[in-house]
Amino acid sequence: MHFDGMSIPIKAGQSLAAALTAAGQRTFRETSKGSSRGIFCGMGICQDCLVTVDGAPNQRACMTLAHDGMQVSTQVALAPLMDAPPLDRAPPSRQISPDVLVIGGGIGGLNAAIAAAQAGAQVVLLDERKVPGGQYLKQSAVADEPLDVQQAEGQKLVSAARAAGVEMTGGVEVWGAFDGLLFLAEHQGGALVIRPRKVIVATGAYERPRMTPGWTLPGVMTTGAAQTLWRSYRTLPGKRVAIFGTGPLNIQVALELAQGGAEVAAVGEAASKPTRNIASGIALIKANATLALKGVMMLAGLRHRRIPIHYEANLVGVEQVDGRLAVTYRDSSGTHQTIVDALCMNDGFEPQNEILRLLGAEMAYDQDFGHLRCRRGETMETTVEGLYAVGDCAGLGGAPAAAVEGRIAGRAAAASCRDEALGDISGLHAQLRRHRAFQSALWRMHSPAPRTLTEALDETIVCRCEEVTLGELRQSLTDKPGHAGTMKRATRAGMGRCQGRYCGPVVARLVAEETGQPLRDHSYFAPRVPIKPISIAAILAAQEALDGQI
């Protein structure tokens, strides 16, 4: 493989982003304003790692498989579009009508698919990733042996799904959801039209970043992206890294990267020391002593490697210095700076709920977590008949809870298809209560609510795609916009390729603070089809398959 004329070594199964990162290449594209960008989310959400591959622009490096002979080049704004090769006719469309459609192949989706199939339903599972497992169970694409117990659990679930007869297809981009449970997707350039009897959405969540000056620089990425590089591709995000934000994922990834050979310069946790919240610690042990012990062992592992954890720590800014990153942060002892190759950040999560919102599932704003939660019944069915939601797409709940929710929804969807009684699921609900109690105690020790931008500098970029700053958003508030959509039209925030997934919640909160109105579903940018950027050829193929009905 070649990148901008340079030979880049690759490993079988490796993504372009992993191969380039391993070779020390950080910058993948340049924006229309001349800024450099690289891998950020690592899961196809941010759309920032775009490169030109064999003359075709706008290819996500994190979602594109690297192979020998590939010619890759830095994408420069929109210039490559003029020289792009002509579009080939898309492959023939495929129409399917399974009993149960599961969207998302993480721990919730896999458990749902297995439960539904074992109950006698015909099940199709679609996943955007080429390898199922999702964020929590991240499966290796370059090694057969699992890295740890968590990855081994994913292997067993994937094998169980196949054994149960679940039809699993990876590399699928679901881009449209319509009333009547009609779904449109793109797979290998062709259209996929799905009309299931029931659907279980298990699309998970994406990470909330810490918006600070420099957070868009190459080398700054989400903690999950760094974990994907390591767990899926055995590629370190850099030789020396720092991790900041809040929550147990940062601690876990810090230890994993250190075990993989990285030098972890600092771990910054926004919350105070766990010893200052003994009551929550006791609640964790009561809810799940095994998981609580796992957390204690991770902290002990960091101490054993002399990796410092700075509590009550917050990022101040990031700058490029001699090809590396100068990370400035503040904790209770003052302001500090460290030089690293990569900065990882996780400041909470945002549910990936666009499909649920498109279909009209009722949402409510969760003040404690700063995001929307989907209203569901005891079977995980939403307010839309036949539509179920499991896991973090319905509101942050954690992987163990997602697994149980998946088993409940899978059994319920299969029973509904056959017009049969569901049967006793009290045992599953008892498990779910324990997992939720654990999560509740865990998040009392951290701080899942979004950080305020009151003290943030005007030059801080909020919209990565359109490079709209906080100052521009604040200035637009002088016109007293009554809705996030008004600010969107005034500033272009949310009009980029990621469709406002990062800036949208911030804009909604800014408007709510200005107007004094409570946040709700309609406070956010409205989800629109296509919910992900896809080829025009795929849209035309879907339209042809549906005889112009869309």
Image (cartoon, rainbow, N blue to C red):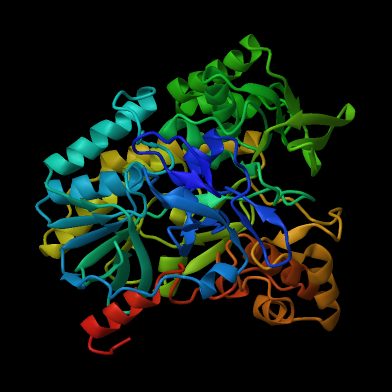
User: In this view, which residue lies farthest toward the front?
Assistant: 5
- Residue name at image x 28 percent, y 53 percent: 409
Give the residue at the far right of this rendering: 334
Between residue 112 and residue 324, name the one nearer to us. 324
Horizontal and vertical percent position of residue 316: 82, 43
Viewer can see residue 277: yes
Location of residue 529 in the rendering, given as x and y in whole percent from the top left corner: 44, 76
Could you tell whether 213 is left or right of 415 in the image? right
Q: Is 175 situated above or below 136? A: below
**Quadrant of the image for the N terminus?**
top left
Image spot of residue 463 (x, y percent):
68, 64
Image location (x, y in percent) of residue 541 = 27, 78
| Residue 405 in sight in this render | no
- 360 vs 113: above or below: below
Q: Residue at x 18, y 37 (%)?
A: 160
Image-quadrant location for residue 375: bottom left
